[in-house]
Image: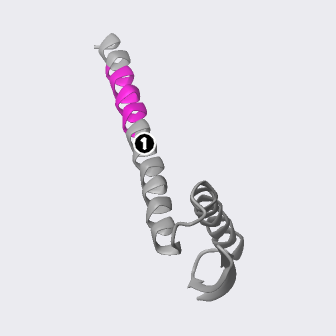
Amino acid sequence: MGSVEVTILGQKYTIKGDAPEEYIRKLAAYVDAKLKEVHNASPSITPVKAAILASLTIADELHRLQEAQENITKNIEERANALTGLFD
């Protein structure tokens, strides 16, 4: 298990994990960008509130991607069933 030092919203953090260093840095950069978006939109917001709003934004993105994936999977299954029906 390795550790990587990253900077998020001006604060340094040491992240420990099994993931490759570049992946951890990529995730940290993404979180940092989301926090900066929130903070730049409302400069007087506290870091905790910025973190909560950024978390909600990231959760929304994840939820939308999961829904899209489910729709794609369902569409593929329906098409596969339709093609299978042609051979029966």
User: Where residue 49 appears, x then y in whole percent?
Assistant: 45, 68
Image position, residue 7 (x, y; %) = 69, 78
Give 75 or 60, whichever is nearer the viewer.
60
38 in magenta = no
Q: Residue at x 34, y 11 (%)?
A: 86
Q: Main secondary structure of the magenta part?
A: helix
Under tag 1, what secondary structure? helix
- Report the magenta residues as a range: 70-81
Which residue is outermost to the top? Answer: 86
Residue plotted at (33% across, 16% down): 82
Is residue 41 found left or right of 77 in the rendered image? Answer: right
Look at label 1 and name its amino acid: Arg
Q: Quadrant of residue 39?
A: bottom right
Is residue 73 a member of the stretch shown in magenta? yes
Disc 1: which residue: 64
Q: Give left or right: position of 65 versus 34.
A: left
Quadrant into which the C terminus falls:
top left
